[in-house]
Image (cartoon, helix red, strand yellow):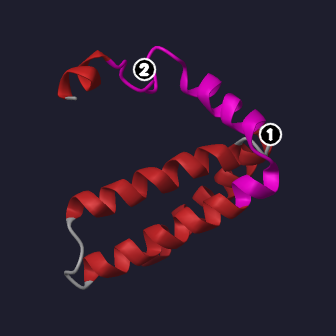
Amino acid sequence: MTEALEDEPEPERWDAALSESDLRKRADLAWSRDSQLNKAAEEFSELSAAINRSLNGQQERESLLQELVDARVMLWQLELLFTDEELTEELETVLDDLDHRLELFG
């Protein structure tokens, strides 16, 4: 029985040669907007819970890292719902606000 398993091909894995952008676009085409929003909310909730467990000493670093990566992938997917211009404009606003707060702080 073990020999038969050795002959089976390995499951397909993400090919690092594929561009991240292509992979994100394929996922965007595969799942609906609502599906991606629901999945993102789920992954962000799991990350939040993992952060709390980590702060309480109940979570291994590796588990927190796994949740962070899951959330990051969903964040990439959500970025496809907006134009680059929208994202850049909002990011600049937030960074300007942060810069202002840091000036007041220090």
Please identify, in this view, whether the residue under mark 1 or under mark 2 is nearer the observer.
Answer: 2
Q: Quadrant of the N terminus?
A: top left
Q: Decide which of 84, 35 is in the foreground and name it.
A: 35
- Highlighted magenta segment, given as a residue range: 8-37
Circle 2 packing at 10 Å, graded few (<14), some (14-19), many (20+), is few
The x, y position of residue 10, in whole percent, is: 36, 23
Examine the rendering and report whether any part of residue 106 can be seen.
no
Q: What label does residue 102 carry, if any?
A: none
Q: Is residue 25 above or below residue 53?
A: above
Indicate the amino acid at tag 2.
Ala
Q: Secondary structure at mark 2?
A: loop
Indicate the amino acid at tag 1.
Thr
The x, y position of residue 11, in whole percent, is: 41, 27
> What's the residue at 58%, 67% (across, down)?
42
> What's the residue at 20%, 21% (across, down)?
3
> What's the residue at 47%, 53% (across, down)?
70
Q: What label does residue 16 carry, if any?
A: 2
- Point out the residue furthest to the front here: 1
> What's the residue at 42%, 77% (across, down)?
49
The answer to which quarter of the image holds residue 35 is bottom right
**Distance between mark 1 and mark 2 Cα atoms:** 25 Å
Q: Is residue 32 above or below residue 71?
A: above
Badge count: 2
The x, y position of residue 75, in whole percent, is: 59, 51
Q: Is residue 26 above or below residue 31?
A: above
Q: Decide which of 36, 56 is in the foreground and name it.
A: 36
Examine the rendering and report whether any part of residue 28 can be seen.
yes
Residue position marked by numbered label 1 in the rendering: 83
Question: CB of mark 1 within 8 Å of CB of mark 2?
Answer: no
The x, y position of residue 80, in whole percent, is: 73, 41
Q: Is residue 102 left or right of residue 77?
A: left
Is 24 in the magenta?
A: yes
